[in-house]
């Protein structure tokens, strides 16, 4: 087999990918199969409350591009049966698209009783610990999905106070009203 000598461009691409890969990792956590869904991210050591754990590292994009990619990811998600959309709103004008293999934080699952929260720090999204987290615990945060599409997102977080659907905590009262308004044979 004949091998081609790596060009300057190849080496630059490799250097950049390595940089991205390192930025998407954290000494606090690792990826494992999850009981909640698919793969998840787990604490690999003790994490004190309020620790910045890992960056949700993707590409910063403007609103029009964010809308385009959101629709594309939604369509793909519909085909695979997953609700995997990786756009995080940064501000009125900008979002982060985290749909990249080096973005480990994209694998963090939702929980109705989460131990993490996503904070906007300047132009970055950083996942912080909401409380002390022990080694082996799965990291989770509130996806903050809108109650209007609750039926599309059943929740399997397994926490004692699971609402049954992935809906932002701020809309739980509204969710309860809608669930109670359903015919009794559908509850
Ligand atoms: C951003 S991904 C998270 C990583 C995902 N576990 C994986 O392996 O790709 C979002 C996907 O995980 C699923 N998911 C996350 N949290 C969930 C939960 N609490 N219950 C059910 N599915 C969940 C969603 O349905 C969605 O398809
Ligand atoms: Zn839940």
Image (spheres, rainbow, N blue to C red):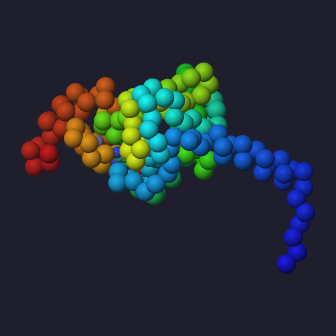
Question: Is residue 116 visible in the rendered structure shown here?
Answer: yes
Question: What residue is rendered at 84% in x and 51% in y?
Answer: 11
**Position of residue 6 in the picture relative to residue 126 (left or right):** right
**Position of residue 132 in the picture relative to residue 112 (left or right):** right
Question: Is residue 77 visible in the rendered structure shown here?
Answer: no
Question: What residue is rendered at 72% in x and 47% in y?
Answer: 18
Residue 50: percent from left, percent from top: 45, 26
Front residue of 163/108: it is 108
Residue 88: percent from left, percent from top: 52, 33
Question: What residue is rendered at 18% in x and 31% in y?
Answer: 177
Q: Quadrant of residue 35?
A: bottom left
**Position of residue 86 in the picture relative to residue 38 (left or right):** right
From this viewpoint, which residue is outermost toward the left? Answer: 184
Residue 140: percent from left, percent from top: 40, 40
Front residue of 79/88: it is 88
Q: Count the marks.
A: 0
Question: What residue is rendered at 22% in x and 37% in y?
Answer: 161
Tell me the quarter of the image containing the C terminus: top left
**Position of residue 10 in the picture relative to residue 18 (left or right):** right
Residue 16: percent from left, percent from top: 76, 44
Tell me the quarter of the image containing the N terminus: bottom right
Front residue of 140/30: it is 30
């Amino acid at each position: 087999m004949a091998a081609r000598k790596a060009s300057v461009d190849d080496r630059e691409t490799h250097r950049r990918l390595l940089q991205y890969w390192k930025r998407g990792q954290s000494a606090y956590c690792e990826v494992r199969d999850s009981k909640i869904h698919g793969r998840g991210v787990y604490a690999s050591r003790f994490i004190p409350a309020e620790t910045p754990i890992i960056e949700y590292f993707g590409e910063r994009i403007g609103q029009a591009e964010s809308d385009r990619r959101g629709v594309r990811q939604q369509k793909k998600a519909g085909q695979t049966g997953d609700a995997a959309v990786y756009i995080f709103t940064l501000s009125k004008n900008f979002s982060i698209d985290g749909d990249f293999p080096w973005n480990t934080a994209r694998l963090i699952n939702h929980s109705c009783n989460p131990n993490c929260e996503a904070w906007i720090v300047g132009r970055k999204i950083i996942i912080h610990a909401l409380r002390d987290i022990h080694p082996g615990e799965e990291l989770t945060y509130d996806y903050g999905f809108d109650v209007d599409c609750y039926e599309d997102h059943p929740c399997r977080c397994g926490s004692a106070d699971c609402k049954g659907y992935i809906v932002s905590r701020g809309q739980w009262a509204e969710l309860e009203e809608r669930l109670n308004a359903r015919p009794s044979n559908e509850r």
